[in-house]
Amino acid sequence: MSISYYVNKLLDSIINKNTLIMKLKQLWDEFMYDRTKLDAAWDISCFVAAVAAFVLMFFAPVTTFLQWFMVVWFAGVNVIIIFLMMFFYYDTTADEVYTTRKLWGWCMLASVILWMFPISVNWSLIPIGLGILAEFSIEEGSLQVGKAFICVFVLIFVFNYTQYNIDKKLHLQSNPVPEVVVLSNYDSAQSVFFIEGQDSYLKLNSYKALKQADELDLKKGDTVKIVRHPELHKHVIKITK
């Protein structure tokens, strides 16, 4: 190939690079049109916090569907996607929505950081509650403590179930020594069974345990190994032979 070919390729690369730089400068100018440097720094920090929350979730010791849903929705959709739409396809609607919801970036980052520690998941209701309060208040133009309190009150019940699943997963990860028992009765329809020496019933209370029970084809007199939930001992989370 001739030297002119490589020269033309180099010029094309330079032109394309300059075009990209000019396009990014145009987008930045549009983004900064009605923002001060402090406003821009705060908006970008909320976006970065949302990205950090999403990435940090992959390093959390135990996660549940609810936690992933909250991070994807509040940090992913309400902050990351809206910020990218606002920056690359600027319009006032996306800007207004981002103004209302951008605080979720920091709220979810704080929540995920709390989820990294062996403490109750309910502690994350503090930053989540602040996010709910901020969004309601900005939308209404006044402090909306009542609405935020109702939402947090409902979430308490949901998070208690989430904590149940977290405790279950952590317990199974610790490889607990199973309890060897003999079935004195088994009701597959209700997913409950009795064991010799105890009057109260035990309940298979996880999808995995139910699947294991179906595969074992349990019946009266079988000797099985069970692992109970660490907090609710009537709930069996693993059953094998």
Image: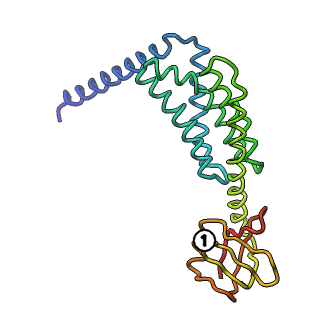
Which image quadrant: the N terminus? top left
Instruction: Write the residue at 40% across / 23% down.
Output: 89
211 over 2 or under it: above or below: below
Image location of residue 30, percent across then percent down: 44, 14
Q: Please give the residue where the numbered disc 1 appears in the rendered image.
A: 210
Instruction: Write the residue at 35% across / 20% down.
Output: 18
| 3 left or right, relative to 16 | left
Residue 149: name its quadrant. top right
Query: Within 10 angstroms of label 1, few (less than 14), some, or many (20 or more) residues?
Result: some
Closer to the camera, 204 or 81?
A: 204
Image location of residue 86, percent across then percent down: 46, 23
Image location of residue 153, percent across then percent down: 72, 40
Instruction: Write the residue at 32% across / 23% down.
Output: 14
176 over 83 or under it: above or below: below
Which image quadrant: the C terminus? bottom right
Q: Give the colouring mode of the picture.
A: rainbow
Q: Secondary structure at mark 1?
A: helix
- The residue most toward the left is 2
Closer to the camera, 155 or 55?
A: 155
Tag 1: amino acid? Leu
- The residue most toward the bottom is 221
Instruction: Write the residue at 61% across / 39% down.
Output: 53
170 over 198 or under it: above or below: above
Residue 169: name its quadrant. bottom right
| 194 left or right, relative to 47 | right
Closer to the camera, 176 or 207?
A: 207
Image location of residue 193, percent across then percent down: 70, 77
